[in-house]
Image: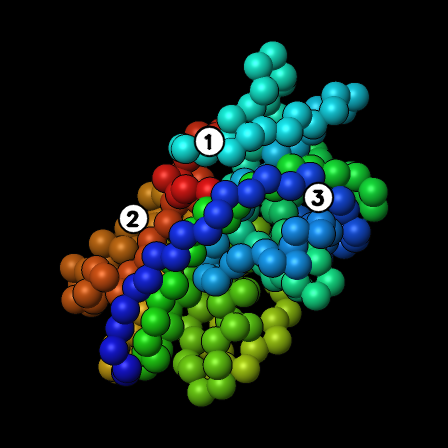
Amino acid sequence: MSQFAVERVRHELKFRVAEVVRNERLTPRMARVTLRHPDFATFPSLAYDDHVKLFFPTPGIALAIPERGPSGLIWPDGAERPEGRDYTPRMFDQARQEVVIDFVLHGDGPATKWAASAKPGDTLGIGGPRGSFVVKGDFDFYLLAGDETALPAIGRRIEELPPGAKVIAFIEIATAAEKQSFDPRANVELHWLDRSAGDPGLVDAVRAATLPGGTGYAFVAGEASASAAIREHLINDRKVDPDLIKAASYWRLGDVDHDDGHAH
């Protein structure tokens, strides 16, 4: 393993009203929406788990345009602030001025409603990313663990790691129909955990896993308590250096609008 380092790279905060180019259904519960804006020609996303904030317009109401303030976006007085949710850019193409966002379709929240019906020409607001958490170093292996909400980050990581990298990934999904295909250059050992088939949950699967020797880096994301339990297991039972674990809570059971603590 080469020298390990983490670099926090800050980006200029920007807000754009992007236009839908395509809306594809990857699986029954996952929509892939391609967005376009001229500013995406310089879209900054240096890390696989970057976050942007998406703002969903209320039908019949024009999307307000915020100004950039010292601590984030400032919305005009009297304007309706649209509902906002955090998402990982699954991929982006600066030459085509496009950013791709994958949406898990569940419940009846604003993101699901918008993504389920979005069509070319529709718009939404997108702010950020405000920063990238760049992990530097060639590790002996990479452990990736998450549920459907972590699939954009996990899929991007799998496809961006270089040839020769070793990846062990555990992904918990609702049914076998939610499996996705990736285009990796790395050597990937992929475990799909199907809840409908009674497969072990994410925490139990990671606890039972046989991991390679050497020094690995772990990315864990999804439901808050599961991410915390896996992080605790890696530190206490496998003696992994906490600095070599990124454990993110993308949602919390029973919490409709969970704040994961990221800056966007």
**In this rendering, the label closer to the viewer, 3 or 2:** 3
**In this rendering, the label closer to the viewer, 1 or 2:** 1
Instruction: Find residue 115 and report its horizontal and vertical position in percent.
Output: 70, 41
The residue under label 1 is 69
Amino acid bearing label 2: Ala
Which residue is at a point 33% across and 53% down the rendered structure image? 247
**Corner quadrant of residue 246:** bottom left
Instruction: Find residue 36 and report its horizontal and vertical position in percent.
Output: 73, 51
The residue under label 3 is 18
First in sequence: mark 3 or mark 2? 3
**Corner quadrant of residue 219:** bottom left
112 up-or-down from 185: above or below:
above
Question: SS for tag 1?
Answer: strand
Q: Nearer the viewer, residue 92 or 90?
A: 92
The residue under label 2 is 228
**Callout 3: 10 Å neighbours few (<14), some, many (20+)?**
many
Cα–Cα gap, marks 3 and 1 = 21 Å
Question: SS for tag 3?
Answer: strand
Residues at discs 3 and 2 in contact (Cβ within 8 Å): no
**In this rendering, the label closer to the viewer, 3 or 1:** 1
Cα–Cα gap, marks 1 and 2 = 33 Å
First in sequence: mark 1 or mark 2? 1
Amino acid bearing label 3: Ala
Does any portion of residue 40 appear in the rendered image?
yes
Q: Which mark is residue 247?
A: none
Question: SS for tag 2?
Answer: helix
Which residue is at a point 48% across and 62% down the rendered structure image? 46
Residues at discs 1 and 2 in contact (Cβ within 8 Å): no
